[in-house]
Amino acid sequence: MTNPVQPSNFIHDIINEDLKNNKNSSRVHTRFPPEPNGYLHIGHAKSICLNFGTAAKYHGLCNLRFDDTNPTKEDVEYVDSIKEDVKWLGFDWADRMYYASDYFARFYEYALQLIKAGKAYVCDLNAQQIREYRGTLTEPGKESPYRNRSVEENLDLFQRMKAGEFADGSRVLRAKIDMASPNVNMRDPVLYRISRAVHHRTGDTWCIYPMYDYAHPISDAIEGITHSICTLEFEDHRPLYDWVLQALEFERCPQQIEFARLNLTNTVMSKRHLRALVEEKKVNGWDDPRMPTISGLRRRGYTPEAIRDFCERIGVAKSNSTVDISLLEHCIREDLNSRAARVMAVLNPLKLVLLNYPENQVEELDAENNPENPDMGTRKIPFSRVLYIEKEDFMENPPKKFFRLAPGQEVRLKHAYIIKCEQVVKDEATGEIIELRCTYDPDTKSGGPASGRKVKGTLHWVSAAHALEAEVRLYDYLFKEESDDGNAVFNPHSLEVLTKCRVEPSLVKAVPGTRYQFLRQGYFNTDLDSRDKKLVFNRVVGLRDSWAKTQNKNNA
Ligand code: ATP
Ligand code: MG
């Protein structure tokens, strides 16, 4: 199934209009501006695809800009991970990687300019007082007693703030706008604060740091950004964004456009929450395959193509909504369906002996690698007297319609023969079924002359003597339900590790990042922990496509 309707993108509508009117001399220049205070998540992927994708669509440019104006939370580890993730998603900033911190000197000069124009002042109220003076949504604010300081005094105090003469938090620089504005963001917002924090790039050069609402429009203007795309929570900040650009009389003014952030079911999406999961060790790091981070999805086995396809399908809208995670899963299934080789792996092995198969015989059977993609060719798989099948594929007392193996019942072994269960062997002490004794019908070899005989079930299997041992990690959602107060409840059973799996010998060449379809079990990715003789696989996603199901129902 492909996209029936092109998802709407109102930002492209705006740009089409701008191009028609020759606005910005018909340039399109966007930026992706992450704060390096955590790893990127799938929500950021939406923003990356939107910014880089829009630039590409209009033959424009997109910058990568680290919005690193808040030194206490930022770190180079995050810078490196962000670069890796953007590249991996398939985007290229060429030589346009910038840091807001590179503009610190210019932000400072612009602040002097605002002071000289009477548009900014140094205020000695503390944070608590500033909050009190700000008023509320229904009441106007009160003017600061420091609001009418002279330009000279403001210049002197601001320079001394920079020189480190005052204690952290003792003074701020504020824009002089309107304490009665219905928009609280316009009530003399803080532009600069004093903080003796060591910055990951500028060290202790600065003890004053600009606020986001001040630094962001200037950074955009400096870089010649035409369309500054951000999420909806900044909508009420847009008048301030525009005020800063006008007050500083920039010639080329970027336009801020807000879109709805991505929310996904069954997970959390803010860096703060994700960091808490890492720090509380509820997951094994930022790249834990259960995490909605790009590095987690990559390790899980998601492809950049599937993530880009997902971002395309969800579209870009102006109102918030929550996307069902089954759509993301649908996208990776669709991608891997044509790319991943089908192989056989038994997750919970049960021994099966073919009583009438010669003891030392081994047949090399032909198996297609991907029926969806004949170019992927075939391989040989060994078949012998002792096999493993999946425990859950056998039932001693099956219900009706159990088309797998049961006493006296026949099934086909994929790529091999029809077998019949003759005898069940149990552990005398525990009663556990430990072995099945079966017979095979030599006339039913797959692809052979009598292969047409039909039985209801087909099972996957491996040859015991040839199979490789593997560890398989199965994942469930991090959050499956909500508590009464509407908070997501962490799912303590989100990881299941199976250590006694057996996989067919062709997987000897699995290296981290190689993806497979394990027949009947889903798509799997070879994990980073796979090395030497140890094979570790992550289940990317099972085969049952609940998203496609609901779509088909809706279309019926
Ligand atoms: P978080 O709240 O998860 O920490 P953030 O907005 O603080 O995210 P930034 O590093 O500031 O993270 O984000 C960089 C860019 O990615 C911003 O333009 C932001 O609007 C965008 N972005 C962040 N989260 C989402 C999301 N869920 N959906 C779409 N875009 C997002
Ligand atoms: Mg942010």
Image (cartoon, rainbow, N blue to C red):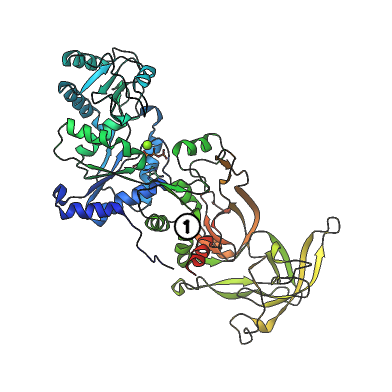
Quarter of the image that includes the N terminus: bottom left
Q: What secondary structure is marked by label 1?
A: helix
Q: Nearer the viewer, residue 28 or 417?
A: 28
Three-letter code for the amino acid on which mark 1 is drawn: Leu
Q: Is residue 136 left or right of residue 205?
A: right
Q: Nearer the viewer, residue 439 or 246?
A: 246
Q: Nearer the viewer, residue 181 or 376?
A: 181
State the image quarter where residue 144 is shown.
Answer: top left
x, y percentage for residue 373?
45, 72
x, y percentage for residue 106?
20, 29
Residue 338 visible in the displayed image? yes
Residue closest to the far right:
428
Answer few, some or many: residues within 10 Å of disc 1's Cα (few below 14, many 20 plus, some between 14 and 19): some
On screen, 162 above or below 289? above
State the image quarter where residue 121 is shown.
Answer: top left
Residue at x 27% of width, y 13% of height: 145
Q: Is residue 475 left or right of residue 192?
A: right
x, y percentage for residue 327?
47, 57
x, y percentage for residue 160?
24, 14
The quadrant of the picture showing ligand 2 is top left
The residue wearing badge 1 is 327
Residue 101 visible in the displayed image? no
Q: Is residue 107 left or right of residue 183?
A: left
Q: Is residue 390 left or right of residue 292?
A: right
